[in-house]
Every structure is written in structure tokens, then in C-alpha cells.
Image: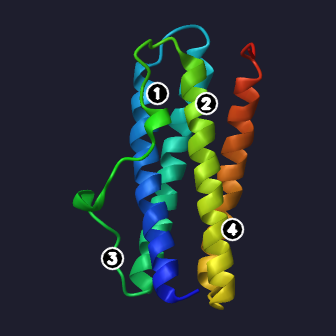
Amino acid sequence: MTSDEITDLLTEAYVDELETVMNYLTNAIVLDGIHAEEVKESLEDDIQEELDHARMLGERLKQLDESPPGSEGFEASQHSLQPPEDTTDVQSVIEGVLEAEDDAIETYRSLHEAASEANDPVTEDVAVSILSDEEAHHTEFRGFLKEFPQD
């Protein structure tokens, strides 16, 4: 892997983290109902952690003599994490979070592999650190999903 591939993955992850912040915040605001409170609280807690991830990624890009993109470099991709029309549809938000976390886990595993191949231990460390958090989020939301009946 080249450093261009590493910076591309860092940039992708940076943008994804910021999109996640927007979607977590919106869903934490709009969800209603008795099943929503614990999910909303978890989303609120995760917002700062996702911002911290974006900061780590942006700082790593800067260390590699690149700049993280501004809003004009943003293209939304988390379609399943958009706020539901029915604000009591907590299950769809949980499923959207799981999909976003799956994507994040895949990105950070790819980043770790690319950094390892490029002998870039600093980026490897960033990837492993964030990957650990994303896997913990995934586990938490997988637990929330178990509370809903499966078809």
C-alpha cells in the first residue's frame, strides 16, 4: 500500500466519523417512546467519542502533510442511519447504527492492514485504537437489537 492509499482511507474515515456525529445527534433528538431513551442516551454518549475519532484522523492526516476535507468534500453515504419518519421506530435506528459500525470496522481493519504493509506504526495504532471503540459500539447496539422481536 502506498501513502496515498493510507491518506485516502484516513480521509474516508474522517468524513464517515463526522457524518456519524450528525446522524447520531439527529436521531438522539428525534426518537420518541419508551424504547427510545436508552438508545438516545447511548447515541449522545457516542457523539463525543466519534468527534474524538475524527480529530485523531484529522491530526494524523496533518502529520502526513495532508489536510482533512471541509464540508465541500462531503458526500453523505449513511442512508440507513437517516432519522425515521416514524420517530418511535427505534429498531430502524439501531439497525442503521449497526450498519454504520460494520462499515467503520471494515474501514479501520483496511486502514490497519494498509498501514502495516506500509510500515506505518503510528497509523496502525490510530486504526487499532478506533477499531476497539467501534467494536464496542457494535456490541452495545447488537444488544439493543436483541430486545426487538425478529421476523
Give the SS element for disc 3: loop
Rounded to the nearest whole Å, what is the CA distance between mark 3 and mark 2? 32 Å
Q: Earlier in the sequence, mark 4 or mark 2?
A: 2
**Amino acid type, residue under disc 4 in the picture:** Val
Dot 4 and dot 2 residues touching (CB under 8 Å): no
- Location of residue 141 with respect to 10 vertically, above or below: above
- Location of residue 127 with respect to 34 vertically, above or below: below
Residue 67, disc: 3
Give the SS element for disc 2: helix
Q: Earlier in the sequence, mark 1 or mark 4?
A: 1
- Location of residue 2 with respect to 55 vertically, above or below: below
Q: What residue is shown with label 4?
A: 128
- What is the residue that sits farthest to the left in this orientation? 72
Say which residue appears at 45% left-offset and 54% top-offset.
Answer: 16
Say which residue appears at 43% left-offset and 74% top-offset.
Answer: 59
- Location of residue 73 with respect to 81 vertically, above or below: below
Rounded to the nearest whole Å, what is the CA distance between mark 4 and mark 2? 24 Å
**Amino acid type, residue under disc 3 in the picture:** Ser
Q: Across the whole image, how many numbered discs are drawn on residues?
A: 4
Q: Earlier in the sequence, mark 3 or mark 4?
A: 3
Which quadrant, please, contains the C terminus? top right
Q: Earlier in the sequence, mark 1 or mark 3?
A: 1
Residue 28, disc: 1
Q: Residues within 10 Å of mark 4 (few under 14, many from 20)?
A: some
Q: What residue is shown with label 2?
A: 95
**Amino acid type, residue under disc 2 in the picture:** Glu
Rounded to the nearest whole Å, what is the CA distance between mark 3 and mark 4? 22 Å
Give the SS element for disc 1: helix
